Image (cartoon, grey):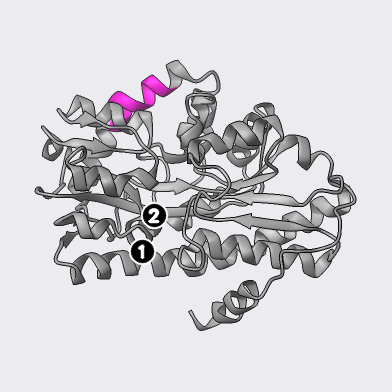
Amino acid sequence: MKLFKPLIAAAAAVSLSFAALPALAQNEIKISHQWKQGTDGRDKAVRVFVEEVNKADPSLKFRIYPGSSLIAKPTAQVDAIQDGSLEMAVYPLVYATGKVPEFSITLMPGTVKSMDHAMRLKNTAFHKKLQEISEANGIHIVTWWWTPGGFATKDRVIAGPDSVKGLKMRAADPYMEEILKAQGASIQSMASTEIYPALQSGVLDGLMTSAESFVSMRIYEQTKNATVGGEYSLFILLQPLIMSKQHWDKLTPKQKEIFEAAATKSEKFFNDGLQKEAAEKMVETFAKNGNAVRPLTKAEYDAWVAKAKEIAWPKFVKDAKDGQELLTLIQQVQ
């Protein structure tokens, strides 16, 4: 973590009031996200990205809006990105599967096996195809940020697929929801910002979400069991910094190079540093707050993946025009 402390300190010192943006018109570049300022890694990584951009081009002007302070509903951010009223956002692409079913590949159980595997997907044919689909829907993927996660519940340990029967669950993705429903769970769909009160009120019994959200949103206060950590994870999610394609196209070629270089720096900070730390902190924090913590065993993981291949993958291929191609391309990278 010592390697990243200078970046954190520098990022925290970034001034977000710069001179007018020449290629994007005179208005500042707004960056919206739903997480807490200064404590959540997604907010920290945004500030690293902004700092790196401004080292190369101080004329660019940004303003970051954390904690849903610009757009109240996290899912509404993609509408604003698509119509160009918002320039940038940190956005789990699975929130937009109603618009773009292909985005479910970014949380498809059994496809991405680890954070290292997720990193190996960058700049592959899979990455290029996902970017092509995204841009066709008005969104440019700027960073390749991935987050590990897992299960947490109020009254029952999650192990293999049979263990969710009768639970009210949140899964973050419609295809994981299909698997849970097939195993006897009922589904409540919601953004991660709604999880805590849903657990508190009894709307939810359990959920899947990222390590960052488990800790920064204090989910552990409302649960008693966590199936997290370990070698096998069903929850590895792409949560990139995205940009409106309209505004990406207004950048000069040099500015695009600057953005891409800043994205690479932010990815090292986020994936190599913050997320490994976040996964460890997730396990530690659950345990410290009285949760029984365990990882999935290989047999349990294999059982979940078998269900994914039986239920989720075929439905994804049927629902998404480019679903089969994405599944084929992601499996080519080991």
Q: Amino acid at mark 1?
A: Ala
Left or right: residue 241 versus residue 303 is right
**Callout 1: few (<14), some (14-19), or many (20+) C-alpha neighbours within 10 Å?**
many
Q: Amino acid at mark 2?
A: Pro
Residue 267 seen: no
Prevailing secondary structure class for the magenta stretch in the rendered image: helix
Q: Would you place residue 139 above or below residue 46 in this image? A: above
- Front position in the image: 93 or 328: 93
Left or right: residue 151 versus residue 164 is right
For the image, the number of numbered tags is 2
Q: Which residues are magenta?
A: 308-316
| Residue at image coords 39%, 54% | 148
The magenta stretch spans residue 115:
no
| Residue at image coords 18%, 35% | 168
Image coords of residue 49 (percent x, y): 66, 62
| Residue at image coords 55%, 80% | 5
Image coords of residue 207 (percent x, y): 26, 44
Left or right: residue 292 versus residue 265 is left
- The answer for how far apart the CA atoms under marks 2 and 1 are is 7 Å
* Label located before the other in sequence (2 or 1): 2
Residue named by callout 2: 148
Q: Which mark is residue 260?
A: none
Residue named by callout 1: 279
Q: Would you place residue 246 above or below residue 3 in this image? A: above
Describe the element under mark 2 as helix, strand or loop: strand
Mark 2 and 1 residues: CB-CB less than 8 Å, in contact?
Answer: yes
Image coords of residue 93 (percent x, y): 51, 38
